Image (cartoon, rainbow, N blue to C red):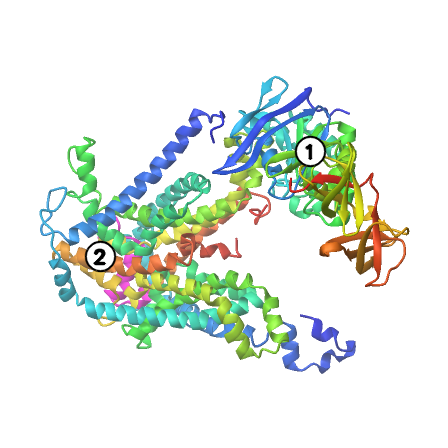
């Protein structure tokens, strides 16, 4: 494989911040990225993930902090001097250039010899499987094909870093999953260090080696997909990772690893994820980990709706104090029936109340 | 913007040069307007930076000499008629153009574009010829007709994108809920279209007050608008005091700019010229 | 549109009433709302134009081409074409070349509204008022000459009115804002992500302008040039008030006006108006042909 990501050991962000007037979009972000890693910046809209990417690309100046590529400080360089590849949300393909010209643009700007450009562009076309579309204009391509051109254009310059800004958000659901596989395949093939911005946790979980969860301009958690999925360190991260039930209650017992809270006349036990303060706690858990109890213990609740989901039923029940509980069931339950719901303590996570 | 990133000197010099050019243009433009205003209040102004003393007598003089009360009345009658008629003809046409596909639509669009693309002097002379032969030349009605030639298409072209951005399902919903054509128009369309119509008609108003060529070519002594009267006054300058003409120019400026200021509350300044952006021929 | 015929049996197309068939083609009551505007434009724009064309071939001497023969044999008449072009072409070119960098600066402004409002003023006031202001402002006793003499740039007042330069400057003052605002609308129509993409791919500011912006702007700039040129070519009041209408700035509209309203020769006036239209059309056609030679690609390529 002749594409190689230019050699470096690590990319370091040191206290990077960006303010727009009095609004800080990014606060004190510090992060180390190793060569060859696939990093996903994950968060809801307005969390600062796109700002972070634009600061890395040089499209937005930083207000504080520094970005280092090994020993070279790069946040003072203009975007054209950084040599990073970037894939834009809108693709930003040059509408007046055909596919070949679009992909070769970066190499032409570097003044590479024509023969070399032609060879590299051919190889990139092969990599994204667009050999037959090389002479077409972007307007003649489908969304997925435009996406491939945008990726090819970014990697053909052999950048030390590939930046992707929600590249799949303009595609329909089926194509999104297909392109997700494609991006992973290209990354495996080239090993280019990639930073990928997304608000879709499925995308982040399936693509990334490490996920950085951002919220309100600060990093909330950094970890592998498995860590984030199973052990979110904050309640808001848990919320983002699909922990849709958040049950708060008075702590009745606690030890070094777990906490138990009272809910009505029942109890729920969860694994501690942070130090509790006060006598209230919140337990977060996924719908699939909240099931109907057969031994009469657990949270009392009344079933309100039940939907068939293929392999099981998912229902909404109203618990003590009117809290909404989303649960799973293997059997159909009549609306209005009284049940008790139990949680798996290993998969229920306990957080301090009000630390969100 | 406090990042250590520095732009090359050449880039900053270029930016400074461009700003200097913009500044030079704007300063001269404002000075040009200031000259007219200063002169209109000057008792005597020859060979000095500023006039010796100020007076408002030229306004009274201009008012009687140029019969400005008559001229203003005629101007507003013409402008009012042009605004109302171009709205009545233009808005329904714009609605149809925005909502229907029909054979020959491109041709119709071209028909509406041409009067805006061809300068008034070019078509004004044959048009004035026709108006004079039908006996309308020199009358107020002739001037109104002439001014409608560019304003009807202008209303259409301003209104089409405005109507297009109103979701047609709103009208469909109104029909489903039993609104007849009349109620659909009065209860649904008119309230939705009012901001657009207001903007388009204000622009027509400003353009018609300032429309020199067509009025000049078709107006008779009793159907002159302010801008044409101003032209004749400047043309025959030397007959009357410069200050008197300048006083009339200020009256004209105020009449135009008041409406411009009102119009700019509703439209973007660029809309005054960029109606040609809708040009499908490009 | 086809829903009505689909809802019926396939063979029943001939049973549709005329009205239904018209509706199927988009010709219903709503479409008819265009009729007043169409009739009006045909009657007051197209008909006079055609009538003028016909009239231009019916000169006073009874021959077919008498007017055109007179025009092209009398230097006092045919020179007006050259005079007008000598004003309109350089002015349009200067306005366009100045508008491009200014539009690129203004594009980056957060609040360009004040500037665009100031620039709209000369367009709104119109050529007559600008001419009146310039007569005093640029005159030998005017502020402009006083300033450059005070700065020591010249000893005697520079003559800027009642000659070529007076008309030239008035066309800049009223024409530049028009050209600029049109250019600005094309420049801001280009997706900023395209420039960012160019920057991340290593293109410097001047490379981005040459390889990305310019090719995408060419169609819009060609249209802007055409519209600005056509306006400048029709220069009339400022050529009379600020120029030397008997000589160096005797532009073609003055010749047409004099034929119509001083000699009352409507046939000749129509002929001059037609010649004016043909010259405008020729320059516009030349620009569009040049554009097509210089630029191959999607014409409507300004949307990302």
> Quick check: A143 left or right of B110?
right
> In this figure, which residue is indicated by the disc labeled 1?
A221
Counting from the top left corner in percent of width and height, residue C97 is at: 41, 40
Q: Which residues are magenta?
A: C246-269
Q: Residue at the location (30% across, 77% down)? A: B135
Q: Residue at x 80, y 56 (%)?
A: A301
Judging depth in this view, the residue of B234 and C180 nearest the camera is C180
Q: Is residue A86 above or below residue B141?
A: above
Q: Which residue is mark 2?
A: B250
| x and y percentages locating residue A168 in the rendered image | 70, 43
Subunit that carries the residue with mark 2: B
Residue drawn 19% across and 42% down? C143
Count of numbered tags: 2
Res B104 visible: no
Q: Are marks 2 and 1 on the same chain?
A: no
- Tell me how far mark 2 sits from mark 1, CA to CA: 67 Å
Chain identifier of the residue bearing label 1 in the image = A
In the structure shown, which secondary structural element does the residue marked by tag 1 occupy?
A: strand
Q: Is residue C249 magenta?
A: yes
Q: Is residue A291 visible?
A: yes
Residue B38 x/y as whole percent: 17, 50
Q: Is residue B83 above or below residue A47?
A: below
Of residues A21 and C43, the one nearer the viewer is A21
Q: Which mark is residue C302?
A: none
Q: Above or below — where is C27 with respect to B269?
A: below
Residue C173 at x, y = what percent? 31, 47
Q: At 47% from the left edge and 46% from the top edge, which residue is drawn?
A: C221
Image-quadrant location for residue B237: bottom left
Q: Is residue B203 left or right of residue A282?
A: left
Mark 2 nearby-residue class (10 Å; few <14, some 14–19, many ≥20): many
């Amino acid at each position: 494989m002749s594409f190689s990501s230019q050699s470096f050991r690590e990319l370091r962000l040191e206290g990077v911040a960006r303010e727009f007037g009095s609004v800080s979009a990014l606060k004190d972000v510090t992060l180390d990225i190793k060569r060859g890693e696939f990093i996903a910046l994950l968060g809801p809209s307005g969390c600062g993930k796109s700002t972070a990417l634009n600061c890395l690309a040089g499209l937005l100046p930083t207000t504080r902090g520094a970005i280092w590529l090994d020993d070279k400080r790069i946040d003072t360089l203009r975007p054209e001097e950084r040599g990073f590849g970037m894939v834009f949300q809108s693709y930003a393909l040059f509408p007046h250039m055909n596919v070949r010209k679009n992909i070769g643009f970066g190499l032409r700007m570097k003044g590479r010899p024509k023969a070399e450009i032609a060879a590299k562009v051919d190889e990139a076309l092969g990599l994204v499987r667009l050999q037959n579309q090389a002479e077409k204009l972007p307007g003649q391509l489908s969304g997925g094909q435009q996406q491939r051109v945008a990726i090819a254009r970014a990697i053909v310059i052999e950048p030390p870093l590939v930046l992707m800004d929600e590249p799949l958000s303009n595609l329909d659901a089926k194509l999104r999953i297909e392109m997700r596989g494609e991006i992973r395949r290209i990354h495996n093939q080239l090993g280019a260090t990639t930073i990928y911005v997304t608000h879709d946790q499925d995308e982040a979980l399936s693509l990334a080696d490490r996920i950085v969860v951002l919220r309100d301009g600060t990093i909330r958690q950094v970890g592998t997909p498995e860590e984030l999925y199973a052990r979110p360190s904050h309640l808001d991260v848990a919320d983002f990772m699909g922990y849709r039930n958040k049950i708060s209650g008075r702590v009745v017992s606690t030890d070094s690893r777990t906490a138990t809270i009272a809910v009505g006349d029942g109890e729920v036990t969860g694994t501690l994820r942070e130090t509790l303060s006060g006598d209230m706690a919140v337990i977060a858990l996924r719908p699939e980990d909240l099931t109907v109890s057969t031994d009469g213990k657990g949270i009392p609740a009344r079933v309100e709706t039940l939907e068939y989901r293929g392999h099981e039923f998912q229902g909404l029940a109203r618990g003590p104090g009117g809290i909404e509980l989303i649960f799973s069931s293997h059997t159909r339950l009549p609306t209005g029936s009284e049940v008790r719901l139990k949680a798996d303590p290993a998969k229920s996570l306990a957080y301090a109340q009000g630390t969100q | 913007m406090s990042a250590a990133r520095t732009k090359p000197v050449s880039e900053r010099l270029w930016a400074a040069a461009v700003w200097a050019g913009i500044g030079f243009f704007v300063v001269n433009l404002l000075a040009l307007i200031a000259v007219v205003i200063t002169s209109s209040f000057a008792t005597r102004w020859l060979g000095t930076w500023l006039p010796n003393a100020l007076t408002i007598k030229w306004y009274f003089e201009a008012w009687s000499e140029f019969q400005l009360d008559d001229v203003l009345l005629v101007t507003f009658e013409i402008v009012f008629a042009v605004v109302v008629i171009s709205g009545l003809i233009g808005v329904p046409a714009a609605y149809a153009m925005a909502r229907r596909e029909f054979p020959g639509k491109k041709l119709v669009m071209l028909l509406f574009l041409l009067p805006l693309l061809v300068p008034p002097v070019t078509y004004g002379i044959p048009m004035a010829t026709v108006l004079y032969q039908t006996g309308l030349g020199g009358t107020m009605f002739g001037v109104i007709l002439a001014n409608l030639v560019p304003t009807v298409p202008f209303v259409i072209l301003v209104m089409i994108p405005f109507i297009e951005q109103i979701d047609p399902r709103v009208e469909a919903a109104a029909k489903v809920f039993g609104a007849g054509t009349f109620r659909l128009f009065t209860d649904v369309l008119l309230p939705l279209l009012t901001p657009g119509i207001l903007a388009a008609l204000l622009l027509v108003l400003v353009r018609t007050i300032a429309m020199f060529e067509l009025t000049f070519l078709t107006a008779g002594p009793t159907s002159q608008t302010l801008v044409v009267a101003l032209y004749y006054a400047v043309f025959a300058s030397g007959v009357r005091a410069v200050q008197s003409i300048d006083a009339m120019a200020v009256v004209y400026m105020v009449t135009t700019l008041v409406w411009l200021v009102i119009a700019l509350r509703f439209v973007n300044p660029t809309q005054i010229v960029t109606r040609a952006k809708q040009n499908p021929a490009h | 549109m086809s829903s009505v015929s689909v809802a019926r049996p396939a063979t029943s197309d001939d049973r549709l009433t005329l009205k239904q068939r018209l509706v199927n083609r988009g010709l219903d009551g709503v479409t008819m709302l265009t009729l007043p505007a169409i009739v009006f434009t045909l009657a007051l724009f197209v008909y006079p134009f055609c009538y003028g064309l016909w009239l231009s071939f019916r000169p006073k001497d009874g021959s077919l081409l008498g007017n055109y023969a007179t025009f092209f044999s009398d230097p006092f008449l045919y020179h007006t074409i050259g005079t007008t072009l000598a004003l309109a072409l350089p002015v349009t070119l200067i306005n366009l070349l100045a508008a491009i960098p200014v539009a690129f600066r203004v594009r980056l402004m957060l609040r360009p509204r004040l500037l665009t409002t100031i620039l709209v003023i000369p367009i709104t006031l119109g050529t007559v008022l600008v001419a009146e202001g310039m007569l005093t402002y640029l005159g030998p006793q005017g502020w402009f000459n006083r300033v450059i003499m005070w700065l020591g740039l010249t000893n005697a007042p520079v003559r800027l009115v009642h000659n070529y330069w007076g008309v030239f400057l008035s066309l800049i003052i009223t024409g530049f804002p028009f050209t600029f605002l049109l250019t600005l609308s094309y420049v801001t129509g280009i997706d900023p992500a395209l420039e960012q993409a160019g920057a991340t791919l290593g293109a410097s500011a001047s490379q981005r302008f040459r390889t990305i912006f310019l090719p995408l702007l060419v169609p819009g700039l060609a249209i802007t040039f055409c519209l600005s040129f056509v306006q400048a070519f029709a220069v009339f009041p400022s050529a009379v008030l600020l120029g030397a209408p008997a000589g160096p700035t005797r532009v073609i509209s003055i010749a047409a006006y004099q034929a119509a309203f001083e000699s009352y020769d409507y046939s000749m006036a129509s002929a001059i108006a037609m010649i004016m239209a043909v010259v405008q059309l020729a320059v516009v056609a030349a620009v569009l042909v040049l554009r097509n030679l210089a630029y191959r690609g999607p014409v409507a390529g300004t949307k990302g």
